[in-house]
Image: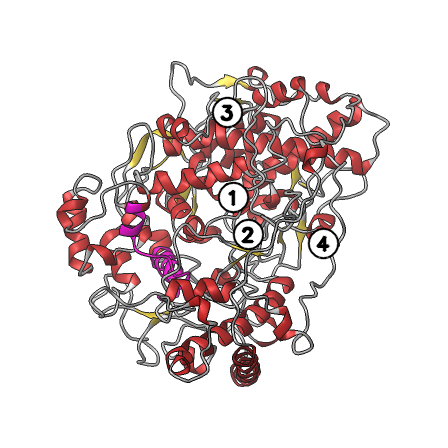
Amino acid sequence: PTLTCLLAIQFANLRNSDRFWYENDLPPSSLNLPQLQAIRRVTLSGLLCEAKGVSKAQPKAFIREDPYLNARLNCEQLSGLDVTPWRSEIVEEVDEDLEEQTPAPPELAELNIDVIEKAIAKAKDQLNERKRFEYESWVNRGGIDAKSPAGTAASFSKANKNALIIANTSLLFELASNEILSNLHSIRRRKRQIFDNNLGNFGGDDFSNALQSIDVNQFITGSISPINLEPQCENLEAPCDTATPFRTLTGHCNNLRSPNLGQSLTTFARLLPAVYDDGISQPRSIAISGNPLPNPRTISSLIHPDISNLHTRYSLMVMQYAQFLDHDLTMTPIHKGFHESIPSCRSCDSPRTVHPECNPFPVPPRDHYYPELNVTSGERLCFPFMRSLPGQQTLGPREQINQNTAFLDASQVYGENGCVGKGLRGFSGRLNSTIHPIRGKELLPQTPIHPECKSPSGYCFAAGDGRASEQPGLTVIHTIFMREHNRIVEGLRGVNPHWNGDQLYEHARRIVIAQNQHITYNEFLPRILSWNAVNLYGLKLLPQGYYKDYNPTCNPAIVTEFAAAAFRIGHSLLRPHIPRLSPQHQPIDPPILLRDGFFKMDIFTQQAGLIDEIARGLVATPMETLDQFITGEVTNHLFEDRRIPFSGIDLVALNIQRARDHGIPSYNNYRALCNLKRAQTWEDLGREIPPEVISRLKRIYNSVDDIDLFPGGMSERPLQGGLVGPT
């Protein structure tokens, strides 16, 4: 089925393409067998216990406790990682077979140089005009407050300076591609053809492939600045160090043959070709009939209503770990305005008056919560939406940029580049922390430089991922992994007192990454996908020995279908409150209402023991069942400012709009990809989707070929033993 298929494909690629995967036998990065066996004994419950906030926990943290095989145990019975196998570690020889190789360049489809140069020249003019428009818009309107609902939402996709520099070049190529495409038919009628004769006639996909294959450097030399990433955090031009057992923070040199594969600030991959309205970049908005696709808010309201259906087996920790994991793998930055301002895309005419990358959508008539008109101005009310940054460095269709590395490398703990990483650590090898003024336990390091922070003190927390302060449950699991790193550093210091701070940091980071990988594949994925799917897609971990299937030709890049749709399944698992439990595992009132916890981190310093209370609540409280139902806390009240009526945002509608922004094809296309029957009629969906849901889909969509991937996948019945449906 669809979501199972898409998620499994992604996680299989992550394992097969990672040279530093903890089970690999690829010196110098491989663990020795005693170290590997120590990692294989790691559990999430053990990490919770070692964080010293929980005295008892069930052995399987993702499963609710019961009086039988998952009964609550004292933490002494759930010990964490023993670092003794890392005493006086010997670095092994480098495998000479993995020396860097330069792949043979593909054959290039030659385009007429004069046509390309003219297209790029016109694109430069258009790009300069856009910059002028952005400046004037900023002068006239400014930007919105980072603490506002829309500003808070933008923080989840905050572009760093390097991403903005890359996107600037991407936009130039995109505008040039549009110019070539718009003139293609008229040019081909001229005596002088745009393409060489040996290319012949071909369709849109062939045209896109031909554009992407062109070496654009010959056309832009001297006309635009090369990509110069500032501040300079790493030297990405230096040769790969084949003798180091440690990853780079950026993911650079994970693949010795193609060092850029999977590194931060590269584009998402695709399982299926993009479907843009204009073939280049305009979001998918047209149905098969030629009419507009349904309003995302209408889909959210009808297909994803707020109905609670608590899971009988799994704990809320499944939801929280899913978000933590997502922030390791994906960060899709969005456009900014002049001077890195946040443009206001809430007005329905904002694409014309504020920023060309605004793509708002209106509140539909007779909405069950939001008024159709702004109660103050009387104007049509729209949901704000800013498009994702492009990152392609070729001509052809838009491809979005991933600001994180593609690897499961705990970048949400350590950062995705050297600048972030250095800011999170000291000279001793430990990660920075704030000591709680009452309990004396470690909290994440506080920072006053956090634009979205809503704490009265002005302080929020810093971590490897900038979203760590988004809501208290996420902050808790970030804290647990920070404490685990520091615990391991002290353990390593004890068995290797001759190691310096850098050695302690790198070895502890390497161990934490291995623990993160092991927990994900050993405990998390089987609950999401089912053991049957884990076996079918080759995701099962080995009980002993080494993994032999590393494939340097496998592209590790996260696919855009995963980032913009499939792995947003965790939104269905959310509950409206974040539970708190006492050391006796009794509920503590009041729980934290989700809408009241966004970027309000003072609660952790004001309430002693809150980290421990939430950690207990996450493992002891049931999650919502993974289905099409999603709490109104995120469909009506996301990042809401209680002082401003109807200021919240609809997360599900944003999911649907984001997938269209990325040119993701319809759900039916992924059924075919995942070996399900491609639906010709509504009845063809009946095996995977319940009839009452099909009935609601029919009320919104005119054709089965119009169904968006997120609502389609979320509507499927789960596979036996898993949480998600087959796609």
Query: Pointer 4: what residue?
Result: 236
| Lower position in the chain sequence, tag 2 or tag 1 | 2
Query: Pointer 3: what residue?
Result: 541
Q: State the residue lying farthest toward the right.
A: 498
- In front: mark 2 or mark 3? 3
Other-residue count near label 1 (Cα within 10 Å), few / some / many at <14 / 14–19 / ≥20? some
Q: Amino acid at mark 1?
A: Leu
Mark 2–mark 1 CB contact (< 8 Å)? yes
Residue 232 rendering spot, x and y as whole percentages: 74, 59
Q: Amino acid at mark 4?
A: Leu
Residue 269 rendering spot, x and y as whole percentages: 48, 52
Q: Amino acid at mark 3?
A: Leu
- In front: mark 1 or mark 4? 4
Label 1, label 4: how many angstroms apart (C-alpha)?
Answer: 32 Å
Other-residue count near label 3 (Cα within 10 Å), few / some / many at <14 / 14–19 / ≥20? some
Q: Residue at x 61, y 26 (%)?
A: 50
Query: Pointer 2: what residue?
Result: 467
Question: What span is colored magenta in the figure?
Answer: 645-672
Q: Residue at x 21, y 42 (%)?
A: 689
Q: Is residue 48 above or below residue 432?
A: above
Query: Pointer 1: what residue?
Result: 474
Element under disc 2:
loop
Label 2, label 3: how many angstroms apart (C-alpha)?
Answer: 30 Å
Q: Hey, which quadrant is residue 586 in on the image?
A: top left
The answer to whether residue 587 is left or right of residue 439 is left
